[in-house]
Amino acid sequence: MDGKQTFILKFRYDDTIGALRTALNAHHTKSGHAGMAYEIRSAFPARAYADEAETLRAAGLIPNGTLFLRPV
């Protein structure tokens, strides 16, 4: 969220945004940032990924995607 860390995560095409958020939350817990509210966004096209049930395929994040986290 501060731009100092990069995560490279690998998921299946039909994994969900919720699974992505769970993996990110695990990293936040380890780094002492547990409980911080954030949204998952893409720069282009500009979009927030809030539907936890949406698959990565349906979100257009395959075969790969670059996302960033923005504190809310």
Image: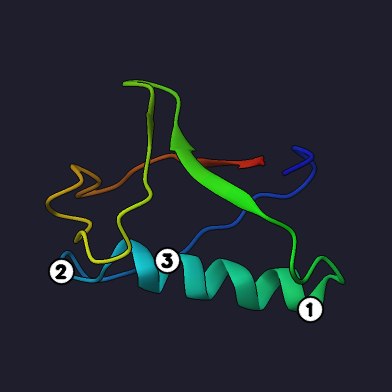
Q: Residue at 74% of width from left, 59% of height from top?
A: 36
2 sits left or right of 9 in the view: right
Residues 67 and 53: in front is 53
Q: Which numbered disc flags the more N-terminal residue, 1 or 3?
A: 3
As helix, strand or loop, the secondary structure at mark 3 comes to helix
Residue linked to disc 1: 30
To which quarter of the image does residue 54 belong? bottom left
As helix, strand or loop, the secondary structure at mark 2 comes to loop
50 sits left or right of 7 in the view: left
Labels in figure, total: 3
In this rendering, does residue 10 appear at all? no
Q: Where in the figure is residue 4, as x and y percent of width and height?
A: 80, 43
Give residue 14's mark.
2
Q: Residue at 74% of width from left, 49% of height from top?
A: 5
Residues 25 and 3: in front is 25
Q: Is residue 39 above or below residue 34?
A: above
Q: Which numbered disc flags the more N-terminal residue, 2 or 3?
A: 2
Q: Residue at 14% of width from left, 54% of height from top?
A: 57
Q: Where in the figure is residue 52, as x and y percent of width and height?
A: 32, 63
* Amino acid type, label 3: Leu
Q: Separation of disc 1 and disc 2 at Cα? A: 26 Å
Residues 67 and 6: in front is 67
